[in-house]
């Protein structure tokens, strides 16, 4: 019996010919990513030795630039740590700042067939690039930084075969919400995406799906390598890598087909995603006070592009705050050059620097008691974006942009015309 993508990556890293679900695998880590929250006193332990400084990266994202004295002090600890061990891959406030999972992709830190750890739960985003990436706890991060190694217990894999194409105004976020709606949580499972329809999904779209796999409680999310993926990575790194395809006789615990043409806009109701999604028509007309486009899942160039298309020549409704956060400074620059930022700002949006900011309720968009928000970020848990009495609906960036124009949750398709 053959192996799935994740089984082949982890077996190879652990120096084994074969790995099967249930195996506990110890292995060297190709990339260890520390973020600003790792350097808070409650999490940080003074590391006396770093096994491989060249395999570490430090990315400040949750509260960057620092939102208060506490986060400023933590980032100073991070800078001192980088200097002490000669860690050159540090993404501080400046040209190459951004949300870790976007920066990891942009800088070529996530390479096909390799292993990456970070303590943020959405680290699985790098699986879009055929990388075995996973969020781990603080002690495991300290261990990985000091020794250059980690371990995983291998779970069985669910395979998704993608066919068809998404319709007008339908995005990868709708596809994720469809998976959550039809199949529920994927706890103690890996997910693998491939098939003939993969070519219809951009790298941004794949990253949205891989990122949101965290909300399914999946262990790892991986995509088959194709020309588009490999070109994307090779444009960003000269470091050799060996992409992994699943074996033809790979042993999956379940195999499911996803027809992109069957996907319709969905919205997650407040407080949960699994078992809590409805068709857009069920909540259309729900008044909002804030609309947010951003995060590691939906702060990409394509997300800003579709929002700009919807907002061009229109205005954000009175009484609504539209906050847009590009997921990296590079995305911000590209959106500026493409004219998206000007369109969004002319419409009344506020565009912030790249940060986790409003998505995690840290800064730059925290919700007040009783407010209602439609978000294209990663989570809609109670209290996630601010006051626990605020209600957080989750939809695609197109749904959020349309809702900002209408002043209530709205279908983007009438505002987009016939083409996407």
Image (cartoon, grey):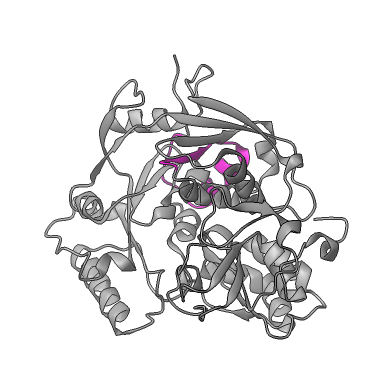
Nearest the viewer among 66 and 404 is: 404
| Image-quadrant location for residue 165 | top right
Pinpoint residue 239: horizontal percent, then vertical percent. Answer: 41, 45
Residue 328 rendering spot, x and y as whole percentages: 52, 67
Between 132 and 283, the residue placed more toward the observer is 283
In the picture, which quadrant includes the C terminus?
Answer: bottom right
Q: Residue 363 occupies which quadrant of the picture?
A: bottom left
At horizontal 62% and vertical 52% (from top left) the residue drawn is: 277
The vertical placement of 296 against 226, above or below, is below
Q: Is residue 62 above or below residue 233?
A: below
Q: Is 416 placed left or right of 17 in the picture?
A: right
Q: Is residue 411 visible?
A: yes
The question of residue 233 being in magenta is answered with yes
Q: Residue at x 56, y 36 (%)?
A: 193
In this rendering, the answer to whether 140 lies above or below 392 is above
Magenta-tinted stretch:
218-242
Report whether 69 appears left or right of 277: left
């Amino acid at each position: 019996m053959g192996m799935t993508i994740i089984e082949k990556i982890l077996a190879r890293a652990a120096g084994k010919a074969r790995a099967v679900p249930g195996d506990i695998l110890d292995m060297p880590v190709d990339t260890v990513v520390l973020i600003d929250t790792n350097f808070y006193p409650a999490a940080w332990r003074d590391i006396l030795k770093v096994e491989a400084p060249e395999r570490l990266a430090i990315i400040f994202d949750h509260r960057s630039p620092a939102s208060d004295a506490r986060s400023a002090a933590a980032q100073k600890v991070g800078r001192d740590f980088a200097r002490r061990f000669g860690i050159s891959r540090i993404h501080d406030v400046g040209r190459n700042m951004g949300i870790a999972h976007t920066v990891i992709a942009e800088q070529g830190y996530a390479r096909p067939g390799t292993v990456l750890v970070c303590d943020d739960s959405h680290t699985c985003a790098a699986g879009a690039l055929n990388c075995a990436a996973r969020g781990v706890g603080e002690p495991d991060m300290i261990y990985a930084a000091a020794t250059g190694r980690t371990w995983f217990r291998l779970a069985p894999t669910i395979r998704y075969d993608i066919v068809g194409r998404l319709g007008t105004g339908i995005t990868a976020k709708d596809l994720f919400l469809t998976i959550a709606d039809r199949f529920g949580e994927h706890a103690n499972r890996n997910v693998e995406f491939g098939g003939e329809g993969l070519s219809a999904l951009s790298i941004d779209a794949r990253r949205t799906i891989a990122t949101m796999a965290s909300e399914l409680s999946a262990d790892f999310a991986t995509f088959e390598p194709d020309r588009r993926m490999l070109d994307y990575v090779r444009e960003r790194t000269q470091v050799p890598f060996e992409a992994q395809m699943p074996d033809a006789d790979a042993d999956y615990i379940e195999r499911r087909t996803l027809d992109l043409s069957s996907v319709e806009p969905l919205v997650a109701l407040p407080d949960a995603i699994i078992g809590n999604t409805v068709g857009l028509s069920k909540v259309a007309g729900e008044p909002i006070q804030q609309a947010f486009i951003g995060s590691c899942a939906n702060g990409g160039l394509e997300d800003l592009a579709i929002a700009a298309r919807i907002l061009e020549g229109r205005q954000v409704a009175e009484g609504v705050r539209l906050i847009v956060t590009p997921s990296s400074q590079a995305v911000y620059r590209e959106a500026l050059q493409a004219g998206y930022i000007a369109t969004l700002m002319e419409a009344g949006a506020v565009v912030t620097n790249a940060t986790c900011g409003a998505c995690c309720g840290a800064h730059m968009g925290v919700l007040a008691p009783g407010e209602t928000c439609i978000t294209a970020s990663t989570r809609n848990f109670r209290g996630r974006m601010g006051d626990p009495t605020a209600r957080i609906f989750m939809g695609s960036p197109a749904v959020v942009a349309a809702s900002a124009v209408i002043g209530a949750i709205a279908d983007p398709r009438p505002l987009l015309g016939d083409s996407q």
